[in-house]
Amino acid sequence: MIIALAFATGFQNTISKKVFSFWGHIRVQHFELGKAAVAEETPISKNDTVENILRSNKNIVHINTFATKSAVLDKNKEIEGVLIKGIDANYDSTQMKPFISQGKWLNFNDSLYSKEIILSSTIAKHINANINDTIKAVFINAANGASTYRKLRVSAIYKTGMEENDKLFVIADIRLIQRLNNWESNQIGGYEVFVNDYHKMTAINDSINLPIVWQSKTIKEVYPSVFDWLAVQDTNRDIVFIIMSIVAIINLITCLLILVLERIKMIGILKALGTNNATIQQIFLYYAGIISFVGVGLGTFVGVGLCILQQQTHLFKMNEENYYVAYAPVELIWWQVGIICIVTFIICFAALILPTLLIKKVEPVKAIAFQ
């Protein structure tokens, strides 16, 4: 049960944090019918009222501006369709930097826009691009079909393991998108909002009162399939808990029944000497309690030990393309481990009362003659 909980918690938190690090916890944009969940076509102007509402919320820790634009990357005739995510110099790079495998973060010192770009390892492999390579980004005007291009230098390569992101997104300066779209310097695609506790992001989102036309969505609403899949892990964890509890209870009841049957003569002698049923039950429950305590202790030692081993060595690998992680992530939460141990012991000990009821039916004369 400890291993199941640690793996389920670690898996859910690791995948969730990967999604959050790329898109934040809450997205704030204009409300538009039929609006794409990821890419936006029309700009919105920065709004002081909206920003003040967001910053006044004590649960919100950071706000990023972003915009996206479709492009085709071309390097030595190797091409790849991508979606460029534009960010500014105030972007909280601490969220994404852990996924940078090579190179350095974007340099925003250029007065017009940064000539640098960050590729995913998947895209870089498809177009044979490396750090410091120059690639051509081709942009198509949806209105008239005209094309233009910009030469950009690869400053870094990232890998989140989330194929939906790694196959599609590159990161660049938002000023490049503004310039290509003929937007004003205060026009953006939307806001990314980071909260202090992602478990409460739905409640935090519901508490945000934005002006008319504006709307906020949790990232769970933007990527429902990912989070629905993660929620299934709770069901798997609960099934493991139920199966393990049933196995433990059956084993302990069987163990105590054997103890009672092996001591039938002793029970008969004790009853013949005047010992009441409750006292004899206490004797067996005492030894059964010791067995339960030792079992829970050994189980905790082995379970926690294997989890720590996995944390340190990443012994158990996973298919990253299917599960978004290269190894099974483990997260031990000690108060949860304590609750598992205590509740398991209480349930098992309570179940042990059942076989001791057999003691009441033991007749001294027959028990002493029992072979």
Image (tube, helix red, strand yellow):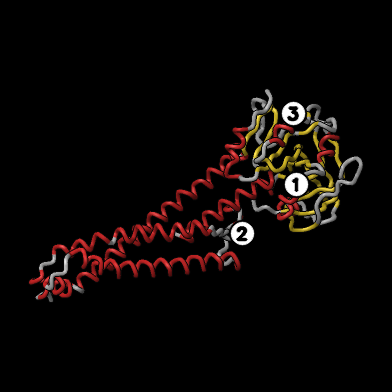
> How far is mark 3 from mark 1, CA to CA?
21 Å
Left/right placement of residue 369 relative to residue 48 reads left
| Left or right, 36 with reference to 127 | left
Q: Which mark is residue 326?
A: 2
Q: Are marks 3 and 1 in contact (CB under 8 Å)?
A: no
Of pointers 3 and 2, the one earlier in the residue sequence? 3
Q: Which residue is mark 3?
A: 49
**Residue at x 38% of width, y 54% of height:** 242
Query: How many neighbours does mark 3 have within 10 angstroms: few (below 14), some (14-19), or many (20 or more)?
Result: few
Q: Is residue 114 above or below residue 283?
A: above
Q: Residues within 10 Å of mark 1 (few under 14, many from 20)?
A: some
Residue 50 rendering spot, x and y as whole percentages: 72, 30
Which one is in front, 152 or 16? 16
Choose between 11 and 351: the one closer to the eye. Answer: 351
Which residue is drawn at the image coordinates 45% and 57% (left, top)?
339
In the image, farthest residue toward the front: 274
Q: Secondary structure at mark 1?
A: loop
Three-letter residue code for mark 2:
Ala
What's the distance in space between the residues labelled 2 and 1, CA to CA? 25 Å
Q: Nearer the viewer, mark 3 or mark 2?
A: 3
Work out which quarter of the rendered image holds the C terminus and state it: bottom left
Q: Residues within 10 Å of mark 2 (few under 14, many from 20)?
A: some
Does residue 121 show up?
no
Q: Quadrant of residue 253?
A: bottom left
The residue indicated by pointer 1 is: 92
Residue 53 is left or right of residue 74, and the answer is: left
Q: Is residue 131 placed above or below 204 in the rendered structure?
A: below
Q: For residue 81, which quarter of the picture?
A: top right
Q: Inspect the image, locate mark 1, and give the three-letter code of the amino acid beneath it.
A: Asp
Does any portion of residue 326 appear in the rendered image?
Answer: yes
